[in-house]
Image (cartoon, rainbow, N blue to C red):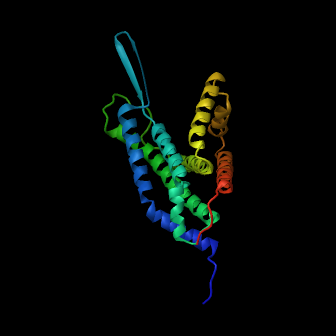
Amino acid sequence: MFLQEANVISVVKKQYFFKLKANYGVFTSLLMTQLFALLFSAFMGTGQSGTSIFNVSLNINYYTGNMIIIFTMIWAFTIGITLNSKASKDGDFAFVSNRLTSNLSNIAFLMTATAVAGLAAMLAGSLLKVIIYYYFTVDNLAGSAFVPFSELVLGVVVSIFYMALFGALGYFVGAIIQMSKLFVFLLPLVFIGLLFVEGRMQGEGPLGQLVQFFALETSPFLFLVKAMAVIALLFLLAIMTDKMEVRK
């Protein structure tokens, strides 16, 4: 009888498809999250203004897909943390696994989930416009319910990379939490502290600079390069901090 060491790619592939089947609830939660955000945006709007002159009043309601994007980002961040939890990693021990194969399969699944999330978020934003255009009674509607195909494709790509960024950030945070449970309390305190710093510095603090690093980038190519570099760095740091032992 000969013992054959499992190929890394083969193990990662098996773990990846296993996680696709085992974590189907992830996509159900994505659907529920985006449906809630869609209904919230449709019925509540994202802004309102009004004025009146000579007994004529004008009310303006603003509807955008920003709320859908924000809710989906939170979802991606949460899924990233969940995938790097101890309970999730214990499922990898059904295979011949180590830290590398476990993390690579997690990353592959997370990238798949965030790609679906980014695509769905962008399409849900377009669906919101269609709902407003055809369902709600409005006197005047500024803008079109339909966007050019090229803009839609670009929006989908950018949305996917934003979801991947938040997913990678969540995965890195999950890895830090696995190092010590103290980070469960320390990380929120650090985040709240940074928010206070932003308030004192009028949005020019570390968080503000980080947001501007991505949000103010006008070149789609440079944005993708920045996003890929940060995503790769976050995943690399998460793998380096992983302390899971090898099991067979």
- Quadrant in the picture for the C terminus: bottom right
Residue 130 versus residue 28 in the image, above or below: above
Q: Nearer the viewer, residue 115 or 194?
A: 194
Residue 10 versus residue 3 in the image, above or below: above
Total count of labels: 0
Residue 43 lies left or right of residue 16; in this view the side is left
Q: Position of residue 223 (x, y in %)?
A: 65, 45
Q: Position of residue 141 (x, y in %)?
A: 39, 32
Residue 21 versus residue 136 in the image, above or below: below
Q: Which of the 4 image quarters holds residue 23?
A: bottom left
Query: Can residue 112 be seen at all in this image of the molecule?
Result: no
Q: In percent of the image, x 67 and y 38: which residue is there?
A: 213
Q: In percent of the image, x 35 and y 14: which residue is there?
A: 56
Query: Can residue 142 be seen at all in this image of the molecule?
Result: yes
Q: Position of residue 49 (x, y in %)?
A: 43, 21
Q: Which of the 4 image quarters holds residue 207?
A: top right
User: Farthest residue toward the top?
Assistant: 54
Residue 160 lies left or right of residue 128; in this view the side is right
Q: Position of residue 12 (x, y in %)?
A: 58, 68
Q: In percent of the image, x 44 and y 43: which residue is there?
A: 125
- Quadrant in the picture for the N terminus: bottom right
